[in-house]
Image (spheres, rainbow, N blue to C red):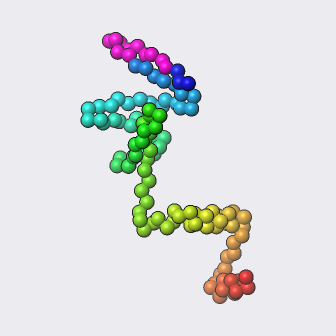
Amino acid sequence: MAEATLNHVNGGVSTVETEHSDEKIIAKSVLKKKGQLTIPKEVRKMLDLKENDELEFSVAGGKIILRPVITIAKDQMWFWTKEWQEAEREADSDIEHGHVHSFTDVDDAIKFLKSE
């Protein structure tokens, strides 16, 4: 259960903050005219957000969830398929465990492949 803390500010203005056990408030921002919101510098730095980055909004449990969107060019989608990524992990593992061979020329490589 979240705890609410009432903050008193000069001029009689007050705010209510809620504390969540799994969340840490890093910074605050104020919603401006026309729905404009500045993402605080600390948050932009933590998420490596740059000007013109695309963000998506969703709402769950009374919270606004803001996520960076990574757009992948259509002609690069093959690289991110499940099958290709599994093959990449297998290749990385082979390299890490020394299951690789080096050849000084093409003929040696072909001889090795034919011997397998």
Instruction: Residue lying at the far front in this picture: please name it.
Output: 61
The vertical placement of 53 against 2, above or below, is below
- Left or right, residue 43 beside residue 115: left
Tag count: 0
Tell me what residue is drawn at x 73 percent, y 85 percent: 115
Span highlighted in magenta in the image: 4-14
Quadrant (top left, top right, bottom left, bottom right) of the N terminus: top right
Residue 61 in the image, given as x and y percentages of width and height: 47, 34
Asked if the stretch drawn in magenta spans residue 11, the answer is yes
Q: Is 85 located above or below residue 65 in the figure?
A: below
The residue lying at 65 percent from left, 65 percent from top is 90
Task: Please say if 9 is above or below 85.
Answer: above
Residue 25 drawn at (x, y percent): 49, 29
> In screen coordinates, is 38 left or right of 111?
left
Q: Main secondary structure of the magenta part?
A: strand
Q: Quadrant of residue 42?
A: top left
Q: Residue at x 53, y 64 (%)?
A: 81
Residue 101 can be seen in this image: yes
Q: Is residue 76 above or below residue 56?
A: below
Residue pictured at 40% horizontal, 43% vertical? 57
Q: Position of residue 7 (x, y in %)?
A: 43, 16
